Amino acid sequence: ETDPIHAFSGPGSYQVRLSATDLNGCLGVFSKTINIKPRPTALFQNNIVCQGLRTRFTDRSVGGSPIVRWLWNFGDGSATSNIQNPNFTFSRPGSYNVRLSVTAADGCSDEITLPVKVRPLPNPDFSAANQCFGTPVRFNDLTLPANYDNSAGGVSDTVALLTTWLWNFGDGNVSTLRNPIHNYRTYGVYNVTLTVIDANGCQKSITKEVTVFAPPIASFNVNSCLLYTSPSPRDRTR
C-alpha cells in the first residue's frame, strides 16, 4: 500500500520501516522512529441544572501535555464558549447534549458529549388577606410543583415535590413554615417574599404586597359645664 493509515494502540516510540521495490526488482529500505503522543481525555461535570438559573460547568479533562484550548457547545443552538469553566443558563427545561472539545499543547485533541437534564422551576404563589393593625396575618402557600414540558426535548419525569419554604415578611422577620401566621408590630404596606425549593434543588421566588391598616382614632369630648334649670313655683308646692 502506497499511503497506509494505521492507528497505534497506545502512546510511545515505534520503529516504522518502509520497503520499496522498483520495476527493476531493486529493493530500498527506510526506517524511522515515530513518537506517538498521548491524547487528552475530555471530561466535565456540572452542578444542578435548573431552568433560567446559572449552571456551572467544570472541566475535568486530563492529558499528557497541558490542555490549552476548550470549546463548549451547550446543545441549545446558542453561542459556544471557549472558557475552561463556563457558566451557562438554559432558558427552557429539557434534555440537552452538551459537547466539550479540548486540545493539548502538543496539538492532540479529544471531545465528549454528555446529556444534561435541565429541570423546570416550581411555580410559587400564596394568598394573604389585608388585616387591621393588631390582627395576625395568615399566609397560605399556593405553590404548584414543577413538572416537565414535554415540548422542550420530550422529557418526562415525576413531579418534583416541594421541600423548603422561606418567607420574608418585609419587616425583618422570616419563617420556614409552609403556612405561617405573622403579627406586624406597626401598620403599613409590606413586600412579602416567598421562596420555594423543590426536591431537585430548583428554587423560585414571588413577592406580593400585604397591607396592615391603621386603626381608627377613637375620641370624644365632654362639656364639664352642666345646664341647671330652677324648678317652677308649682313644682315647689308639690
Image (cartoon, rainbow, N blue to C red):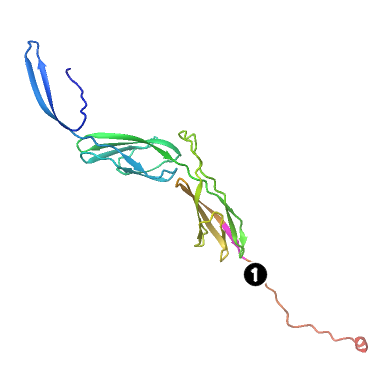
Please, what is the three-letter code of the amino acid marked with disc 1? Ile
| Residue 214 percent across, percent down from the top left | 61, 65
Element at badge 1? Answer: loop
Residue linked to disc 1:
217
The residues colored magenta run 210-214
Label 1, residues with CA under 10 Å away: few <14, some 14-19, many ≥20: few
Determine whether 189 is above or below 226 in the image: above
Determine whether 230 is above or below 44 in the image: below
Q: Nearer the viewer, residue 65 or 73?
A: 65
| Residue 66 percent across, percent down from the top left | 22, 41
Q: Which of 137 and 8 is in front in this view?
A: 8
* Residue furthest to the front: 9
* Residue furthest to the top: 24
Q: Nearer the viewer, residue 209 or 109?
A: 109
- What quarter of the picture does the N terminus occupy? top left
Magenta stretch holds residue 124:
no
Q: How many marks?
A: 1
Q: Main secondary structure of the magenta part?
A: strand
Q: In which quarter of the image is residue 133?
A: bottom right
Q: Nearer the viewer, residue 3 or 17?
A: 17
- Residue at image location 77% in from the left, 83% down from the top: 226
- Residue at image location 40% in from the left, 36% down from the top: 96
- Residue at image location 51% in from the left, 41% down from the top: 159
Determine whether 34 is above or below 132 in the image: above
Left or right of residue 148: residue 54: left
